[in-house]
């Protein structure tokens, strides 16, 4: 499970709704009517949020409520979060419970992740189902599975948390105490040089902002990205991102090379051809662009692609397997630069000229905070 970074913060959804309504209407009376609160309750909600954030959100006067800069920063995020939640009946406890259950797959796992009791989580999810009038979970033995409705709700809740996390970070930045955390999904091609260089620069300039790196394949990271669990994903761009609700930005091009151990029988072959099919290969899964390119490359050389006995996306594992066998693979030079410099692996350019776009993938319509924008800018600079 990827922690959202504000899981321990008391979260009152109605307080954020009160903030957004007051900014929108500029009047306590109209705002209270909009969120179905009494005026004293609305005033108390705003005061509670001001105390929690440590800022003044409104200047009170006879003319009404004038939003301060922190309120203007937080209000659009609160509006978006409430839209994602989709119901004024949802409480912060219920939101947290469903998200924990969705990620853990069991009440016991959710209890361990949140520190709440299983009974409390059961009660919160049950109350949420009553409040929404929807069945959100199905029990399957010791585990539970979200219904399609539950999955949609959990995704909305995750996106709401991402918006609130961003709003809180923006307020902290306004206060002059850059805080929060950027959660980066890292596919293999981003980890060798590009991402470490960007993180090093960012950490020097923004020491108060944490960076969490979650490693995985496109399939493992795209779901958490869409759900708001991670902020951006780095690696090879995929076609059809728009259909998945994602947006990609190319930063640089990478050309894979043929990689093998030093002393491999093909090391001194001028232009390896159909004999490439005579050796075992270590490659990522069949759904990846690199695997499809490998198949097309061998067929263009007059050979039928052999069965890939070892499917692996871990460069560390692939490197060791290459050292211990006559296996072949396709990798970026940067991914094995240490081994190439040490002379234990060797790389050959390919006549196919295949290259892939490496870049940044985000949710469509993502609105980064100022610190997230700074991190993205550094990624562009380091990849150039």
Image: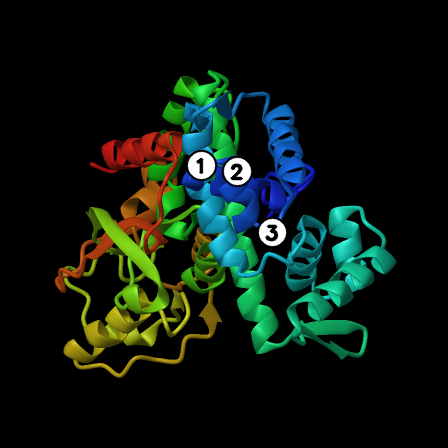
Q: CA distance from mark 3 to mark 2?
A: 13 Å
Q: Nearer the viewer, mark 3 or mark 2?
A: 3
In the rendered structure, which disc, 3 or 2, sits on the residue that comes first in sequence? 2
Residue that carries the numbered disc 1 in the rendered image: 23
Residue, far front: 62
Please identify the quadrant where the C terminus is shown: top left
The disc at residue 19 is 2
**Closer to us: mark 3 or mark 1?**
3
Residue 182, visible in the rendered structure: no
How many C-alpha atoms fall within 10 Å of the one at disc 3: few (<14), some, or many (≥20)?
A: some
Who is closer to the viewer here, 115 or 68? 68
Answer yes or no: do the residues labelled 1 and 2 have beta carbons within 8 Å?
yes
Pointer 3: what residue?
Answer: 36
Give the image location of residue 383, x and y in percent. Answer: 25, 38
Cα separation between marks 1 and 2? 6 Å
Disc assigned to residue 250: none
Instruction: Determine crowd level at label 1: few under 14, some 14-19, many 20+ residues with C-alpha closer than 10 A.
Output: many
């Amino acid at each position: 499970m990827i922690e959202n970074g504000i899981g321990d913060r008391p979260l009152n959804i109605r307080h954020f709704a009160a903030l957004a309504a007051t900014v929108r209407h500029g009047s306590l009376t109209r705002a209270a009517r909009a969120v179905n609160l009494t005026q004293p309750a609305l005033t108390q909600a705003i005061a509670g949020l001001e105390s929690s954030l440590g800022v003044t959100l409104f200047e009170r006067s006879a003319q009404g409520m004038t939003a301060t800069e922190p309120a203007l920063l937080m209000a659009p995020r609160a509006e978006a979060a409430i839209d994602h939640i989709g119901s004024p009946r949802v409480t912060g406890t219920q939101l947290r419970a469903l998200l924990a259950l969705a990620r853990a797959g069991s009440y016991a796992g959710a209890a361990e992740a949140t520190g709440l009791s299983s009974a409390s989580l059961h009660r919160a999810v049950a109350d949420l189902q009553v409040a929404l009038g929807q069945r959100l979970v199905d029990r399957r033995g010791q585990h539970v599975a979200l219904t399609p409705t539950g999955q949609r709700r959990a995704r909305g809740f995750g996106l709401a948390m991402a918006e609130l996390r961003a709003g809180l970070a923006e307020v902290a930045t306004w206060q002059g105490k850059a805080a929060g955390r950027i959660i980066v999904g890292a596919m293999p091609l981003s980890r060798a040089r590009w991402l470490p260089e960007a993180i090093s620069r960012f950490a020097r300039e923004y020491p108060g902002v944490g960076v969490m790196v979650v490693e995985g394949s496109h399939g493992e990271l795209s779901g958490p990205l869409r759900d708001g669990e991670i902020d951006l994903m780095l690696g090879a761009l995929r076609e059809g991102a728009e259909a998945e609700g994602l947006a990609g930005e190319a930063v640089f091009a990478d050309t894979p090379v043929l990689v093998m151990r030093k002393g491999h029988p093909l090391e001194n072959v001028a232009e390896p051809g159909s004999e490439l099919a005579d050796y075992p290969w270590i490659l990522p899964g069949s759904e990846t662009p690199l695997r499809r390119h490998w198949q097309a490359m061998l067929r263009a050389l007059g050979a039928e692609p052999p069965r890939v006995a070892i499917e692996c996306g871990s460069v560390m594992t692939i490197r060791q397997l290459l050292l211990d066998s006559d296996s072949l693979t396709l990798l970026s030079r940067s991914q094995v630069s240490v081994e190439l410099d040490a002379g234990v692996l060797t790389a050959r350019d390919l006549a196919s000229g295949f290259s892939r776009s490496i870049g940044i993938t985000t949710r469509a319509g993502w609105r980064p905070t100022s610190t997230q924008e700074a991190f993205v800018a550094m990624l562009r600079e380091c990849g150039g």
